[in-house]
Image: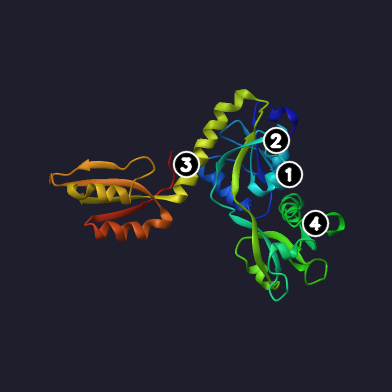
Amino acid sequence: MNAESLDGRLLFAIPKKGRLHEKCLELLVGADIQFRRHQRLDVCLVKNHPIALVFLPASDIPSFVGKGNVDLGITGQDVIIEAKMEKHITEVLQLGFGKCALQVQVPEAGPIQTSEALAGKRVVTSFEVLSGQYFSKIDDSLQLTGENRTKIEYVGGSVEAACALGLADGIVDLVESGDTMRAAGLHAIATVQQTEAVLIKSSKPKHEYLEPLIKLITSRIAGVVAAGKYVVCEYNILRSKLHAATSITPGRRAPTISPLEDEEWVAVSSMVEKSKTADVMDKLVTIGAEDILIFNLDNCRV
């Protein structure tokens, strides 16, 4: 593949490995972005759109997008701040996966149990910028100066082993399930930042002619995200109970209400959050709703 084959194409950066990679591939399939990645190449052409996918380390994607080298990208919110690119990129869409927390962790049985107690000591992390910002505020509030301020040391991997090896008094690391943290004898004492995967674009795009395509892809991805988050709930309810019913199922904008042959009854169709389905059905039964049906969504436009 040469540079000419990329001319006029929207460049879309995707994490090449790690916690976000597989979810991103599922998202592309759901959005009908068709491609075949040959021999683990880091650039491949999309078959059904003028798009080229660029597979990059997630930590590099904010810089590539912010500087306009690629037009769109998917990465974590934490990585954007760590790369100091917040002012150079626009967060287009939260994607609902890759959710985790950047947390301060210390040995569970140790004497340090608050961030204030850890301030001034040694902290190992892969997130120097976020950790530095967090502890700088604590150091300032405690009026720590010079050598007494918290010492942030960068480690690229196996951060959770730092305390056991005597390299640190505490660490700052991402926590998803918490299994790795507990296995290392650590527990969280504070959260620096909640994070999830986001779709981003440059705040100053170089290729204005690509905006219609960016809007199309964003709409498709938003539909896939919504389809994973929502179900359609349909039921019949007495007209006299309609106000109570629609307060339970207000929908994304408003529910669809259809008359039935029995004028005292109506049919209601509404999108509800998948995680709240059981609770919604229970409440509908309580007010007298009947024939309650739940339909999963393969895709949608919202």
Q: Residue 223 bears which disc, if any?
A: 3
**Mark 3: amino acid:** Gly
**Mark 2: amino acid:** Gly
Q: Earlier in the sequence, mark 1 or mark 4?
A: 1
Secondary structure state at the residue bearing disc 4: loop
Question: What distance separates the C-alpha of mark 4 from that of mark 2?
Answer: 35 Å
Check whether the beta carbons of the residues at disc 1 and disc 4 lie within 8 A of each other. Answer: no
Q: Earlier in the sequence, mark 3 or mark 2?
A: 2
Q: Which residue is mark 4?
A: 144
Q: Which residue is mark 2?
A: 66
Question: What distance separates the C-alpha of mark 3 from that of mark 2?
Answer: 25 Å
Is residue 1 in view from this perspective?
Answer: yes
Check whether the beta carbons of the residues at disc 2 and disc 1 lie within 8 A of each other. Answer: yes
Q: Position of residue 194 (x, y in %)?
A: 60, 53
Check whether the beta carbons of the residues at disc 3 and disc 2 lie within 8 A of each other. Answer: no
Check whether the beta carbons of the residues at disc 3 and disc 4 lie within 8 A of each other. Answer: no
> Dot 3 surroundings within 10 Å: few (below 14), some, or many (20 or more)?
many
Q: Earlier in the sequence, mark 4 or mark 2?
A: 2
Q: Nearer the viewer, residue 131 or 259?
A: 131
Q: Nearer the viewer, mark 3 or mark 2?
A: 2
Question: What distance separates the C-alpha of mark 1 from that of mark 4?
Answer: 26 Å
Q: Nearer the viewer, residue 247 or 116?
A: 116
Q: Which residue is mark 1?
A: 83
> Dot 1 surroundings within 10 Å: few (below 14), some, or many (20 or more)?
some
